Amino acid sequence: MRVLIAEDEKKIAEFIRRGLKEEGYAADLAHTGPDALRLAEENPYDLLLLDVMLPGLDGLAVCAKLRQGGFAAPILMLTAKDRVEDKVKGLDSGANDYLTKPFAFEELLARIRALLRARPAEASTRLTAGDIALDLAAHKASLAGKELDLSAKEFSLLEYLVRNKGRIVTRTMIAEHVWDINFDTGTNVIDVYINYLRNKLEKKPAKKVIHTVRGKGYILKD
């Protein structure tokens, strides 16, 4: 999952980014309203964490403009304002949820998981492809009933492939959804992680799961 963190307090933004990265999320940062608006319009984010008090353009305006432009991903407002009328303004501008500062990081994670689960196309927390099963809530993967030992990035890559099983996904698509905006497309990191997964999923030579489509990308088949 790829998340945009729009927060002008850089220490808080970096703390959230590091925490989400440890949980397997790809996260980009924006410190002003105009930057948040631009990044959200240019990139396929799965969720937006949006501080209300952003310089240049406040979070309420950013949220409203994004919704007017068709931005469909969940938006979680972050703010120090805890008055009912402030929360109402945030929700009326198009936000899905509202979290008051200071907050526990565990609560932020729980709210993110809840918002991602609530999306109509992805309501289930369990994904399958052949013998592969993913438990998104527990962040666990198994193959034919046996739990796989995956790193956070390996899990994120496998989740993206399973969500798109039977479809070709390009390296650009993978980079956009599994890595962040700072990813160097000139490296072979994606190929390396594909090989990591193959070594863990394809125990038998004849059991090929992740196929390379020359000149296009990869496809995971049941």
Image (cartoon, rainbow, N blue to C red):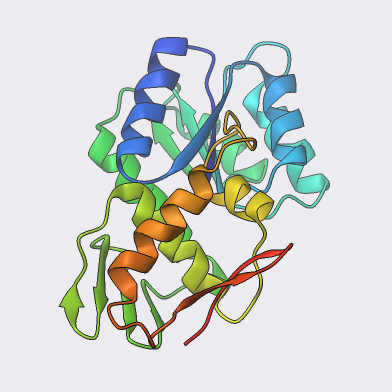
From the viewer's perspective, is 130 left or right of 63? Answer: left
Left or right of 13 on screen, residue 6: right
> Is residue 130 at all visible to an observer of this figure?
yes
Residue in the image at 40% along x and 36% along y: 99
Q: How many marks do you count on the picture?
A: 0
In terms of image quadrants, where is residue 154? Answer: bottom left
Asked which quadrant contains residue 186, the reply is top right
Answer left or right for 167 relative to 127: right
Q: Can you give x and y, in whole percent of width and height, for residue 34 in the image? A: 75, 21
| 176 lies above or below 115 | above
Residue displayed at 35% across by 22% down:
15
Q: Position of residue 169 (x, y in %)?
A: 64, 65
In the image, residue 19 sits, relative to residue 68, either above or below, namely above
Q: Residue furthest front?
A: 205
**In percent of the image, x 73 and y 30: which residue is there?**
37
Residue that sits furthest to the left in the current view: 146
User: Where 154 falls versus 65 (above or below)?
Assistant: below
Q: Residue at x 42, y 64 (%)?
A: 158
Q: Position of residue 81 (x, y in %)?
A: 45, 22
Q: Position of residue 168 (x, y in %)?
A: 66, 71
